[in-house]
Image (cartoon, helix red, strand yellow):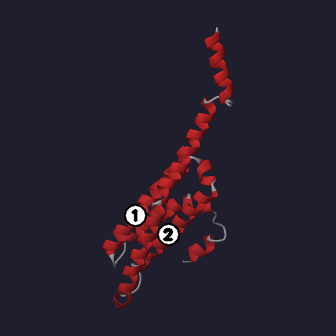
């Protein structure tokens, strides 16, 4: 927890979603290997975390312009927070004794469901981000290929037919 407190003031959305996302995925997978309780839930959560991390890397590699859009940064920044909570939850399955685990089992099961649902909700944003990116790229291509004034094109066609 102290690590996140130290990073919070310095982290930007790009850091949270970029370099830190890869670190969070790696740290979560490492924590899953040593979890003592809720192993099945930890492994299911790790699969979601890996999927989200892979998608984040793809989006970052695709278009830096897309990542600069405030809507995209806000959505992906939220995903970074969900990945951080997933990591903290998996780490909580490593610590403390059997009595604590028994007492907290119901609460942890609810936390697993909540974090998985939160990650899933953010993963639903990826098709929208992809659609926005593709639309922007297609508009650019169209604008490069299409003449700036379509009435000029009509005049050229009519003059060519008159000859």
Location of mark 1 (residue): 48
Q: Where does the C terminus fall, quadrant-wise?
A: top right
Q: Is residue 33 visible?
A: no
CB-based contact (under 8 Å), mark 1 and mark 2: no
Question: What percent of the width, then of the height, locates residue 150?
Answer: 65, 29
Side (left or right) of 54 relative to 74: left
Question: What percent of the width, then of the height, locates residue 61?
Answer: 54, 48
Side (left or right) of 51 relative to 74: left
Q: Looking at the image, which residue is at 54% across and 77% down?
A: 1
Q: Residue furthest top?
A: 163
Residue 77: image quadrant is bottom right
Residue 107: image quadrant is bottom left
Q: Looking at the image, which residue is at 51% across and 65% down?
A: 79
Question: What percent of the width, then of the height, locates residue 84?
Answer: 51, 70
Location of mark 2 (residue): 82
Residue 95 is labelled as none
| Mark 1 Cα-neighbour bin, 10 Å: few <14, some 14–19, many ≥20 | some
Q: Is residue 99 above or below residue 109?
A: below
In space, the residues marked 1 and 2 are separated at their CA atoms by 11 Å
């Amino acid at each position: 927890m102290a690590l996140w407190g130290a990073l919070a003031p310095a982290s930007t959305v790009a850091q949270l979603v970029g370099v830190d996302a890869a670190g969070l995925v790696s740290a979560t997978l490492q924590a899953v290997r040593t979890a003592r309780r809720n192993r099945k839930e930890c492994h299911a959560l790790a699969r979601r975390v890996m999927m989200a991390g892979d998608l984040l890397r793809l989006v970052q590699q695709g278009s830096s312009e897309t990542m600069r859009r405030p809507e995209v940064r806000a959505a992906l920044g939220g995903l970074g927070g969900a990945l951080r909570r997933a990591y903290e939850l998996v780490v909580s399955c490593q610590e403390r004794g059997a009595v604590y685990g028994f007492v907290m089992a119901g609460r942890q099961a609810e936390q697993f469901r909540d974090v998985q649902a939160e990650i899933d909700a953010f993963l639903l944003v990826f098709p929208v981000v992809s659609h926005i990116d593709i639309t922007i790229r297609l508009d650019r291509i169209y604008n490069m290929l299409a003449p700036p004034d379509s009435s000029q094109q009509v005049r050229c066609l009519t003059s060519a037919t008159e000859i």
